[in-house]
Image (tube, grey):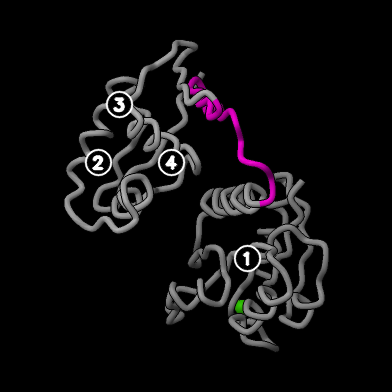
Amino acid sequence: MVRLLLVEDDLSIATPLLTALRREGFEVVHVTTGGEAIDAKGVDLVLLDLGLPDIDGREVCRQLRQRDDTPIIVVTARGDEIDRVVLLELGADDYVVKPFGFRELVARIRAVARRSSGQREAPVERLELGTLVIDRRAHQVLMDGELVTLTPKEYDLLDHLADDPGAVHARERIMQEVWDEHWWGSTKTLDVHIASLRRKLAPELIETVRGVGYRLVAPAG
Ligand code: CA
Protein backbone atom coordinates (compact mmCIF):
# COMPACT_ATOMS: atom_id res chain seq x y z
CA MET A 1 0.00 0.00 0.00
CA VAL A 2 1.24 3.45 -0.90
CA ARG A 3 1.39 5.81 2.08
CA LEU A 4 0.80 9.42 1.05
CA LEU A 5 1.53 12.65 2.86
CA LEU A 6 -0.97 15.32 1.87
CA VAL A 7 0.28 18.82 2.64
CA GLU A 8 -2.66 21.16 2.12
CA ASP A 9 -3.95 23.99 4.33
CA ASP A 10 -7.19 24.53 2.43
CA LEU A 11 -9.67 22.15 4.07
CA SER A 12 -12.23 22.62 1.29
CA ILE A 13 -9.68 20.87 -0.94
CA ALA A 14 -8.08 18.54 1.61
CA THR A 15 -11.22 17.00 3.13
CA PRO A 16 -12.85 15.64 -0.06
CA LEU A 17 -9.42 14.69 -1.42
CA LEU A 18 -8.62 12.65 1.71
CA THR A 19 -11.89 10.75 1.42
CA ALA A 20 -11.37 10.07 -2.28
CA LEU A 21 -7.73 8.99 -1.90
CA ARG A 22 -8.58 6.64 0.97
CA ARG A 23 -11.40 5.15 -1.07
CA GLU A 24 -8.83 4.59 -3.80
CA GLY A 25 -6.85 2.44 -1.36
CA PHE A 26 -4.14 4.90 -0.31
CA GLU A 27 -3.13 5.41 3.28
CA VAL A 28 -3.05 9.18 3.77
CA VAL A 29 -1.47 11.35 6.44
CA HIS A 30 -2.74 14.93 6.29
CA VAL A 31 -0.86 18.00 7.52
CA THR A 32 -1.61 21.68 6.95
CA THR A 33 1.78 23.35 7.36
CA GLY A 34 5.23 23.18 5.83
CA GLY A 35 6.78 22.60 9.25
CA GLU A 36 4.69 19.47 9.82
CA ALA A 37 5.51 18.26 6.31
CA ILE A 38 9.25 18.52 6.97
CA ASP A 39 8.83 16.65 10.28
CA ALA A 40 6.68 13.85 8.81
CA LYS A 41 8.40 10.50 8.39
CA GLY A 42 7.72 7.10 6.85
CA VAL A 43 5.74 8.16 3.80
CA ASP A 44 6.12 6.88 0.23
CA LEU A 45 5.03 9.97 -1.66
CA VAL A 46 4.29 13.62 -0.86
CA LEU A 47 1.47 15.71 -2.38
CA LEU A 48 2.62 19.24 -1.72
CA ASP A 49 0.54 22.39 -2.00
CA LEU A 50 2.82 25.36 -2.67
CA GLY A 51 0.73 28.01 -0.91
CA LEU A 52 1.24 27.13 2.76
CA PRO A 53 0.70 29.39 5.78
CA ASP A 54 4.13 29.07 7.40
CA ILE A 55 6.89 28.17 4.92
CA ASP A 56 6.94 28.73 1.16
CA GLY A 57 6.10 25.44 -0.56
CA ARG A 58 9.19 25.67 -2.75
CA GLU A 59 11.37 25.77 0.34
CA VAL A 60 9.48 22.78 1.80
CA CYS A 61 10.08 20.92 -1.46
CA ARG A 62 13.78 21.71 -1.38
CA GLN A 63 14.15 20.60 2.24
CA LEU A 64 12.23 17.37 1.69
CA ARG A 65 14.43 16.54 -1.29
CA GLN A 66 17.57 17.31 0.68
CA ARG A 67 16.48 14.82 3.33
CA ASP A 68 15.68 11.81 1.12
CA ASP A 69 14.38 10.50 -2.23
CA THR A 70 10.68 10.33 -1.33
CA PRO A 71 8.87 11.37 -4.53
CA ILE A 72 7.08 14.73 -4.46
CA ILE A 73 4.12 15.84 -6.58
CA VAL A 74 3.61 19.57 -6.33
CA VAL A 75 0.07 20.96 -6.40
CA THR A 76 -0.08 24.51 -7.70
CA ALA A 77 -2.93 26.96 -8.07
CA ARG A 78 -3.69 28.23 -11.55
CA GLY A 79 -2.14 31.66 -11.81
CA ASP A 80 0.82 30.77 -9.59
CA GLU A 81 3.76 31.79 -11.72
CA ILE A 82 5.17 28.32 -11.65
CA ASP A 83 8.13 27.47 -13.75
CA ARG A 84 8.23 23.76 -14.44
CA VAL A 85 12.01 23.82 -14.66
CA VAL A 86 12.31 25.50 -11.26
CA LEU A 87 10.03 22.86 -9.73
CA LEU A 88 12.11 20.04 -11.14
CA GLU A 89 15.28 21.76 -9.93
CA LEU A 90 13.79 21.93 -6.45
CA GLY A 91 13.40 18.17 -6.64
CA ALA A 92 9.71 17.74 -7.50
CA ASP A 93 8.94 14.61 -9.53
CA ASP A 94 5.76 15.93 -11.11
CA TYR A 95 3.12 18.61 -10.62
CA VAL A 96 -0.60 19.17 -11.08
CA VAL A 97 -2.45 22.46 -11.46
CA LYS A 98 -5.63 23.21 -9.48
CA PRO A 99 -8.38 22.59 -10.24
CA PHE A 100 -7.28 19.10 -11.25
CA GLY A 101 -9.35 16.02 -12.00
CA PHE A 102 -9.17 13.33 -9.35
CA ARG A 103 -8.48 10.60 -11.94
CA GLU A 104 -5.61 12.63 -13.30
CA LEU A 105 -4.13 13.02 -9.85
CA VAL A 106 -4.41 9.29 -9.09
CA ALA A 107 -2.76 8.48 -12.42
CA ARG A 108 0.13 10.81 -11.59
CA ILE A 109 0.51 9.31 -8.11
CA ARG A 110 0.64 5.78 -9.47
CA ALA A 111 3.08 6.73 -12.24
CA VAL A 112 5.44 8.52 -9.87
CA ALA A 113 5.20 5.73 -7.27
CA ARG A 114 5.89 3.11 -9.94
CA ARG A 115 8.87 5.04 -11.30
CA SER A 116 10.41 5.47 -7.88
CA SER A 117 9.92 1.83 -6.85
CA GLY A 118 11.34 0.84 -10.24
CA GLN A 119 14.52 2.69 -9.37
CA ARG A 120 14.97 0.63 -6.25
CA GLU A 121 14.07 -2.78 -7.63
CA ALA A 122 15.88 -4.82 -10.23
CA PRO A 123 14.66 -4.21 -13.76
CA VAL A 124 11.59 -6.22 -14.72
CA GLU A 125 12.61 -9.14 -16.90
CA ARG A 126 9.17 -9.92 -18.21
CA LEU A 127 6.77 -7.10 -18.86
CA GLU A 128 3.09 -7.98 -19.26
CA LEU A 129 0.78 -5.31 -20.57
CA GLY A 130 -2.60 -6.86 -21.25
CA THR A 131 -2.09 -9.27 -24.16
CA LEU A 132 1.38 -7.90 -24.93
CA VAL A 133 4.36 -9.60 -23.31
CA ILE A 134 7.93 -8.35 -23.57
CA ASP A 135 10.50 -10.90 -22.46
CA ARG A 136 13.56 -8.76 -21.91
CA ARG A 137 15.94 -11.59 -21.23
CA ALA A 138 15.12 -13.34 -24.48
CA HIS A 139 14.50 -10.08 -26.39
CA GLN A 140 11.19 -11.55 -27.51
CA VAL A 141 7.75 -10.08 -27.92
CA LEU A 142 4.51 -12.01 -27.71
CA MET A 143 1.13 -10.67 -28.76
CA ASP A 144 -1.92 -12.77 -27.85
CA GLY A 145 0.51 -15.60 -27.10
CA GLU A 146 2.08 -15.45 -30.58
CA LEU A 147 5.74 -14.66 -31.08
CA VAL A 148 6.22 -11.47 -33.12
CA THR A 149 9.49 -10.87 -34.96
CA LEU A 150 10.78 -7.32 -34.56
CA THR A 151 13.93 -5.63 -35.85
CA PRO A 152 16.36 -4.58 -33.08
CA LYS A 153 15.29 -0.91 -33.37
CA GLU A 154 11.59 -1.81 -33.30
CA TYR A 155 12.25 -3.84 -30.19
CA ASP A 156 14.17 -1.00 -28.51
CA LEU A 157 11.42 1.46 -29.36
CA LEU A 158 8.68 -0.79 -28.00
CA ASP A 159 10.69 -1.53 -24.88
CA HIS A 160 11.23 2.19 -24.31
CA LEU A 161 7.51 3.02 -24.65
CA ALA A 162 6.55 0.04 -22.46
CA ASP A 163 8.86 1.15 -19.68
CA ASP A 164 6.32 3.79 -18.65
CA PRO A 165 3.04 2.70 -20.25
CA GLY A 166 0.34 5.34 -20.32
CA ALA A 167 2.90 8.15 -20.20
CA VAL A 168 3.41 10.39 -23.22
CA HIS A 169 6.88 10.04 -24.67
CA ALA A 170 8.08 13.11 -26.55
CA ARG A 171 9.41 12.50 -30.05
CA GLU A 172 12.75 14.20 -29.46
CA ARG A 173 13.26 12.30 -26.25
CA ILE A 174 12.54 8.96 -27.94
CA MET A 175 14.97 9.82 -30.73
CA GLN A 176 17.66 10.68 -28.24
CA GLU A 177 17.17 7.62 -26.07
CA VAL A 178 16.39 4.93 -28.62
CA TRP A 179 18.51 6.13 -31.53
CA ASP A 180 21.30 8.42 -30.42
CA GLU A 181 21.71 10.76 -27.50
CA HIS A 182 23.14 13.42 -29.79
CA TRP A 183 20.33 13.13 -32.27
CA TRP A 184 18.63 16.36 -33.33
CA GLY A 185 17.46 15.86 -36.93
CA SER A 186 14.29 14.60 -38.61
CA THR A 187 11.95 12.26 -36.75
CA LYS A 188 10.70 10.58 -39.91
CA THR A 189 12.49 7.35 -39.09
CA LEU A 190 10.55 7.28 -35.80
CA ASP A 191 7.21 7.47 -37.65
CA VAL A 192 8.30 4.61 -39.90
CA HIS A 193 9.14 2.42 -36.90
CA ILE A 194 5.91 3.31 -35.10
CA ALA A 195 3.91 2.40 -38.22
CA SER A 196 5.74 -0.90 -38.42
CA LEU A 197 5.09 -1.73 -34.73
CA ARG A 198 1.38 -0.94 -35.18
CA ARG A 199 1.24 -3.20 -38.21
CA LYS A 200 3.04 -6.09 -36.53
CA LEU A 201 1.38 -5.84 -33.11
CA ALA A 202 -1.90 -3.91 -33.02
CA PRO A 203 -2.91 -0.58 -34.60
CA GLU A 204 -4.34 0.75 -31.33
CA LEU A 205 -1.30 -0.25 -29.26
CA ILE A 206 0.52 3.04 -29.85
CA GLU A 207 -1.45 6.25 -29.64
CA THR A 208 -0.29 9.44 -31.36
CA VAL A 209 -0.38 12.48 -29.07
CA ARG A 210 -0.51 15.35 -31.53
CA GLY A 211 2.33 17.78 -31.38
CA VAL A 212 4.05 15.82 -28.60
CA GLY A 213 4.80 12.19 -29.30
CA TYR A 214 3.48 8.73 -28.57
CA ARG A 215 1.86 6.76 -25.79
CA LEU A 216 1.62 3.01 -25.36
CA VAL A 217 -1.83 1.73 -24.52
CA ALA A 218 -1.91 -1.71 -22.92
CA PRO A 219 -4.07 -3.98 -25.08
CA ALA A 220 -7.04 -5.42 -23.19
CA GLY A 221 -6.95 -9.17 -22.70
CA1 CA B 1 -2.83 26.56 0.10
Tell us which disc is closer to us: 2 or 1.
2
Q: Give the amino acid at mark 2.
A: Leu
Real-space Cα separation, disc 3 to disc 1, in angstroms: 35 Å
Q: Residue beneath label 1, please?
A: 72
Q: Is residue 134 left or right of residue 17?
A: left
Q: Are marks 1 and 4 in contact (CB under 8 Å)?
A: no
The residue located at (63%, 84%) in the rendering is: 59
The residue located at (50%, 41%) in the rendering is: 163
Q: Nearer the viewer, residue 131 or 9?
A: 131
Q: Is residue 213 left or right of residue 129?
A: left
Characterize the local packing of mark 1: few (<14), some (14-19) or many (20 or more) Cα atoms within 10 angstroms: many
Magenta stretch containing residue 134, yes or no? yes
Real-space Cα separation, disc 1 to disc 4, in angstroms: 24 Å
Q: Are marks 2 and 4 in contact (CB under 8 Å)?
A: no
Q: Residue beneath label 2, please?
A: 190
> Residue 110: horizontal and vertical position, in percent?
61, 48
Real-space Cα separation, disc 2 to disc 4, in angstroms: 13 Å
For mark 4, give the secondary structure. helix
Q: Nearer the viewer, residue 56 or 134?
A: 134
Of the image marks 3 and 1, the number of the one nearer the N terminus:
1
For mark 1, give the secondary structure. strand
Q: Residue beneath label 3, please?
A: 198
Magenta stretch containing residue 167, yes or no? no
Of the image marks 2 and 3, the number of the one nearer the N terminus:
2
Of the image marks 4 and 3, the number of the one nearer the N terminus:
4
Real-space Cα separation, disc 2 to disc 3, in angstroms: 12 Å
Of the image marks 2 and 1, the number of the one nearer the N terminus:
1
Tell us which disc is closer to us: 4 or 3.
4
For mark 2, give the secondary structure. helix
Magenta stretch, residue numbers: 120-137
Q: Give the amino acid at mark 4.
A: His
Q: Residue beneath label 4, please?
A: 160
